[in-house]
Amino acid sequence: MNLALVTSYIIAAMLIMSIVMMNLRMSSSSAELTLTQLTRERVVAVAEMLNDDIPNIGYNVYSKTDETLTYANSHRITFYRNIENDETREPERIT
């Protein structure tokens, strides 16, 4: 066989292998970045909920709510609040 032909096949195989490895690394990095971004978005959503709900536990514009906390455990709390400026509206239940 011709030495130049064998050398070109070896170089082509090395180039293809390097391209495949780079593609695998990019795919892995992309998946990791996507998961990190999703986690950050969920943390922001939970933080916004806590910043809005926790200060308003038991708050009622017109009178005191009957029960401040109706249920609480390590994963969930339930309470009533009424922050609307409407006398006819009942306090809403937040879980």
Image: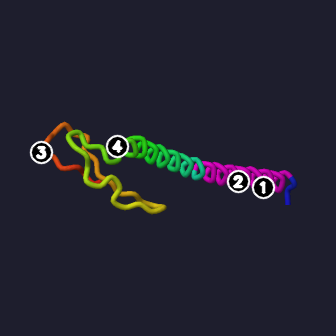
Residue 49 coordinates in the image, percent (x, y): 40, 45
Residue 32: x, y in percent?
Answer: 60, 51
Foreground tag (2 vs 4)? 4
Label placed on residue 21: 2
Front label number (4 vs 1): 4
Provide the major secondary structure of the magenta segment.
Answer: helix
The residue sitting at 22% across, 43% down in the picture is 63
Q: Nearer the viewer, residue 2 or 64?
A: 64
Give the class, few, some or many, for how many residues have Cα within 10 Å of label 3's Cα (few <14, many ≥20): few
Amino acid tagged 4? Asn
Is tag 4's residue or tag 1's residue first in the polypeptide sequence?
1
Mark 1 = which residue?
A: 9
Q: Residues within 10 Å of mark 4 (few under 14, many from 20)?
A: some
Residue 88 is tagged as 3
Which callout, 3 or 2, points to the residue nearer the camera?
3
Of the numbered discs 1 and 3, the one sitting upstream in the chain is 1
Residue underneath mark 4: 56
| Residue 80 is covered by the magenta coloring | no
Q: Magenta residues, as a range?
A: 4-30
Q: CA distance from mark 3 to mark 2?
A: 66 Å
Counting other residues with Cα less than 10 Å from the Cα at mark 1, is it few (<14), some (14-19), or many (20 or more)? few
Q: Marks 2 and 4, how far apart in space?
A: 53 Å
How many other residues sit within 10 Å of disc 2, few (<14), some (14-19) or many (≥20)?
few
